[in-house]
Image: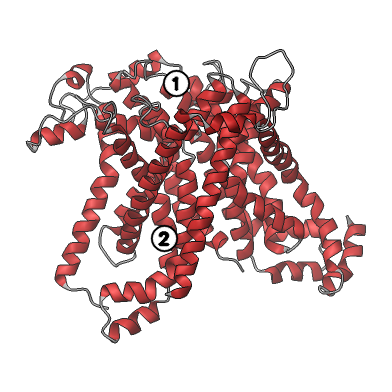
Amino acid sequence: MRTSAAGRVGQYAALLGYLVFLAFPFLWLVSTAFKSPRELGSPHPTWIPRHPTLDNFRQAFDEQPLLRAAGNSLLAALAAAVIAVLIATPLAYVMARQRTRLAKAATGWVVVSQAFPLVLVIIPLFLVLKELRLINSLAGLVMVYVVWALPFALWMLVGYVRAVPGELEEAAAVDGAGRLRTLVSVTAPLLAPGIVATALFAFITAWNEFFFALVLLKTPEKQTLPVVLTHFIGAEGVADLGPLAAAAFLATLPSLIIFAIIQRRITGGMLAGAVKS
Amino acid sequence: MTVVTATKRPARDAPHAGSRRSSDRGAWFLVLPALIPILVLSVGPLLYGILLAFTDAQSGRTRATQWIGGLNFQDLLHDTLFWESFRIGLVWAVGVTVPQFLLALGLALLLDQDLKLRWLARALAIIPWAMPEVVVGVMWRLVYNPDAGVLNETLRTLGLGDGRDWLSGLSTALPAVIVVGVWAGMPQTTVTLLAGLQNTPHELHEAAAMDGAGAWRRFRAVTWPALRPVALAITALNFIWNFNSFALVYVLTSGGPGGRTRLPMLFAYEEAFRYGQFGYAAAMGLVMVAVISLLLALFLVGRIKAGDEA
């Protein structure tokens, strides 16, 4: 399978095109974040800021309660990720190992839940949470995030469970280990890397989430980072570009770092989940 | 615990004789922690939402909610604004899903080759996926900004005119947000297709090459048949996700100018949480599900049939 020299050149040209398309908006965001207000107002913007400054970052923190919003986001995402993984792992185990009606129903739910528009879910959820006095509360948001992160978490975890050979568990059972013991001391350690990857993915999902947070959180003290970010954009759609760029850049960093760590595992997990045994 | 184990052991030894019931019972304590939240916060609200579509539920009203049958749907039928929004939603969903797939397929095929810089492309391809949608929206607002944006500046440098206010132009707003949608959704599709590609049999590929098949024929005869199930699945999912998308357009244009980018989700959101028409908005949601399911079923059946004939 040899590719001709001309073909190679074409491939590299195409790859370069992709690189530019994928990278340029992000580079522009970073560039804007370090530009002074005067430079942003000038008619010919440049890629490299002429006088790089941190003023935008300072101003961003002055204008909006970014730290508190980040704290809210962190709390909600962390709680949602931990709870989602704790309750998803046992169910994923059953879905992967058994062909019962329950396991099939759970798989069906994972698929169907992807198809429903959020608006059909958010209205009743809003009413239910209102009854429970959980509107404008992070606890209510966490509950929603847990259920919202479950389908993909289950999908990934089922793949990881399938990768653990069932013979190992049978061997443990033969040696007299009970069901729970087998799970805790044989299966769980083998699953650990997959569980961590799933938790990190659930964390990012919740950290990035906007729609539920927009509907469920009313006061600025409770709002998460994505919602607060939209406050930089005024009613008329006019935004103070510098601080907006600075805040958006900061809000992305946690997701980017985590994603870089788990990149490979997500690909593996998705494929493992997709390949039915 | 020991008692439970003792009663279960025989079932394990004879997996075909009546094992189903005992393993079912043993599984309950594993399943319950997830099942309760799923029932209470997903299945329940979903059913509740479907019921709401047949009521006159409104927010902050003191009078009891009444069952009004299909009245919401009758109103909806004559609601031209909603159908205009629905049409925009379809244009957006198709306009995003198709280029998304083609571009992602191209990138996946490139990444499957032995090229330098592949690691960089892989890393970059992940960025849009990891970013919060709100940040993606903010970022592209900066790109499209008429004065401080890089797009107009590039056009000016290339001597292609002064550019324009892309997101406020009646004719440019929808294409502009579609480009953002493509950009934002490409990574996930690429990664999925790449994973599918790496599962295609390489021996077949080499055999076809030895027989003198060109790149295009190899793709048609070997790669595509193996990739097709993955491609269909991700395209169907992309279509659903795109049709139901909200945050990107909310941040980019909030549905403007003049409703030109008002996707159905934005429309329903405003109906529910700005005007408080819960029942009516739920009816919209239901119509969205119904039409999308129908379209998707037609698409999948058509594709599968086409595949059988090929």
The quadrant of the image that shows the N terminus of chain A is bottom left
Which residue position holds label 1?
A: A66
* Residue at the left extreme, as displayed: B159
Circle 1 crowding by C-alpha within 10 Å: few under 14, some 14–19, many from 20: many
The answer to whether B23 is drawn above or below residue A235 in the figure is: below
Name the chain letter of the residue that bears numbered label 1.
A
- Bin the neighbour count of mark 2 within 10 Å (Cα to Cα): few under 14, some 14-19, many 20 and up: many
Foreground pick, A124 / A272: A124
Residue A161: percent from the left, percent from the top? 64, 60
Q: Position of residue B112 (x, y in %)?
A: 34, 65
Q: Residue at x 87, y 69 (%)?
A: B18
Q: Position of residue A167 (x, y in %)?
A: 70, 71
Toward the bottom, the furthest residue is B211
Foreground label between 1 and 2: 2
Residue B181 % position (x, y): 37, 41
Instruction: Give the Cα separation between the discs numbered 1 and 2.
Output: 38 Å
Quadrant location of residue A275? bottom right
**SS category of the residue bearing label 2:** helix
The kind of secondary structure element at disc 1 is helix
User: Going 76% across and 59% down the picture, which residue do you hit?
Assistant: A101
Q: Report the side of B291 relative to B120 (left or right).
A: right
Q: Circle 2 is placed at which residue position?
A: B193
Q: Amino acid at mark 2?
A: Leu
Horizontally, residue B65 falls left or right of residue B175, namely right
Do circles 1 and 2 both sit on a common chain? Answer: no
What chain letter is assigned to the residue under label 2?
B
